[in-house]
Amino acid sequence: PLTDLEARKFLERHANDRVEQYFGPAREATRSLFSRRTIIAAADVLENLTQAEISALLTDFGPSVYENIGGGSAKARMVELKQFIDRNPRHPVDDGLLE
């Protein structure tokens, strides 16, 4: 017995033409809306917000984001946000992506 992930990897290696038959259409590869440098620059601008404004922004992103961003200075929180985005670039937020 194989898990779905193991079976998919097996098919991708040995019968790539059958992957969509068993697992459905492949998702289209998409490019990020913004470059990493643009995202970092945006986070740098956010350092000028007050702690309350940063908290409100992180809360708007949802619990999966704000629970991963600690306290501390505005700069420290924006560094953590940058790190979170680096680890989770395609993280869904509302009807879009965090990045």
Image (tube, rainbow, N blue to C red):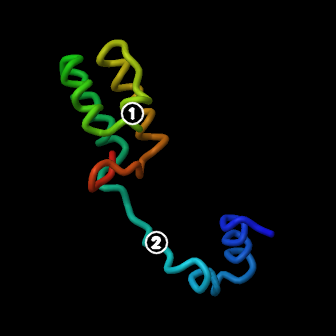
Query: Relative to 50, is 66 on the left or the right?
Result: right
Identify whether 34 is placed above or below 16: above
Q: Residue at x 35, y 22 (%)?
A: 77
Q: Nearer the viewer, residue 40 or 93?
A: 93
Name which residue lies at 42% across and 47% down.
Answer: 89
Q: Residue at x 23, y 17 (%)?
A: 51
Amino acid under disc 2: Arg
Query: Which of the two labelled residues, at mark 2 and mark 1, occupies the earlier sequence position?
Result: 2
Left or right of 49, for residue 38: right
- Look at mark 1 in the image and give the residue it sits on: 82
Mark 2–mark 1 CB contact (< 8 Å):
no
Please name the residue shown 41% across and 29% down the image. 67
Of residues 2 and 76, the one drawn nearer to the viewer in this rendering:
2
- Tell me which amino acid carries mark 1: Lys
Q: Say above or below: 89 vs 77.
A: below
Instruction: Point out the image quarter for the N terminus.
Output: bottom right
Label ID, residue 27:
2
